[in-house]
Image (cartoon, grey):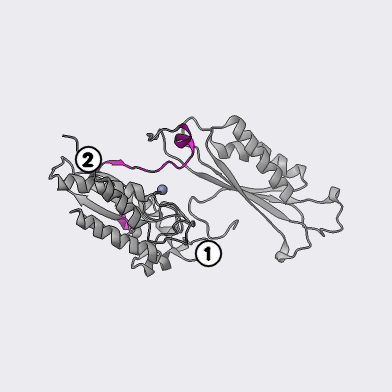
Amino acid sequence: MPLGISLPRLRSHIEALSRFGRNPEGQGITRSCWSPAHEEARAWLLDKMKEAGLATKVDLAGNTFGRLGGEGPVVMTGSHIDTVPQGGPLDGALGVLAGLECLHTVNEAGIRTRFPLTVAAWSDEEGRYGSLFGSRAFTGKLDPKLIPDFRAADGERLVDAMARAGFNALEAPKARCDPRTLSAYVELHIEQGPHLETARIPIGVVEGIVGIHRDRLTFIGEPDHAGTTPMARRKDAFLGAADYALRAREHIVRCGSWTPRSWRGWSGNAGGFASPSPGAAGCAWRSSPCRAPSPPAAPLVCSPPWSGRARRSGSSPGACRPAPATTPRTWPR
Ligand SMILES: [Zn+2]
């Protein structure tokens, strides 16, 4: 017999969760992980899981689980309840609350499943302190050595944010799960690009997972007086970086996949004075190849055009190194 969820209940849960961290009208929801709004939302979610008859658990990385059923490897679903600044009410929340609704429905119908079912909310999925923090810890991919250095863009340390919420960040790697306790994972998520909506297709199944690759490139020029050094004699590192960024993008649009890529740039001079021209500049390269056969972007762009761009502007190539996948404390250093 087909089993139907309660759409009014799901809607009311989405509405209720969206009140935690709600900004003034038109400015979305800001509910970053470990913030008071997030912790209130977590407490609310745990209550709703209990109402649904689930056994609840919060692990050492702050991942929140609701479980239905007995022993055996679990079939898991879920997503995240943290948001980006001014985020929407569905990103992450839909996956968690739809999973909760499914488990609630199964439980109400008195159905016993072959494997236990679990709904999860992964912590700091949006990466305020460290991207995919909770699921990294859960899958054993969180490097304990990096934890003390995780900081938000405003400088707040992860260890302090987690302590405020009642967690010890250094313990998070212990949240690693034994893979034998899992049988399957499925996640419902709103579309993050425009494709399905443009084509008016209501739902899709992903063919691959986005993998983000970052490199930091530095161009070294020569600072000089900005007002009097003739243009032809300048060695402006920023020009090398700017030219490189544009041409590398062209190259990848032409030869690479259709997936997004972006750049961030900086230029610097001695001591923050306004008058010297920039002596160093750089750009951070970020790509999201999400379906094979995407080209290995970094080696492609780091090799010949990298040095050529720099030399043509009078600067020299400084360094091209992989950037960490997690939020850097400051950039470029
Ligand atoms: Zn999301």
> How far apart are the alpha carbons under marks 1 and 2?
45 Å
Asked whether 329 falls inside the magenta stretch, the response is no
Q: Which residue is mark 2?
A: 4
**Quadrant in which residue 37 is drawn:** bottom left
Image spot of residue 271 (x, y percent): 71, 66
- In the depicted structure, whether residue 40 falls above or below residue 191: below
Question: Mark 1 or 2, which is nearer the eye?
Answer: 2
Instruction: Count the labels in the image.
Output: 2
Cβ at disc 1 under 8 Å from ligand 1: no
Horizontal side of 332 relative to 123 (left or right) equals right
**Is disc 1 placed on a helix, strand or loop?**
loop
Report the amino acid beneath label 2. Gly
Q: Residues within 10 Å of mark 1 (few under 14, many from 20)?
A: few
Report the amino acid beneath label 1. Asp
Question: Viewer-proximal residue, 106 or 277?
Answer: 106
Q: Which residue is mark 1?
A: 154
- Give the mark nearer the N terminus: 1 vs 2: 2
- In the depicted structure, whether residue 48 falls above or below residue 286: below
Horizontal side of 312 relative to 87 (left or right) equals right
Image spot of residue 132 (x, y percent): 41, 51
**Is disc 2 placed on a helix, strand or loop?**
loop
Residue extent of the magenta highlight: 174-199
Asked whether 194 falls inside the magenta stretch, the response is yes
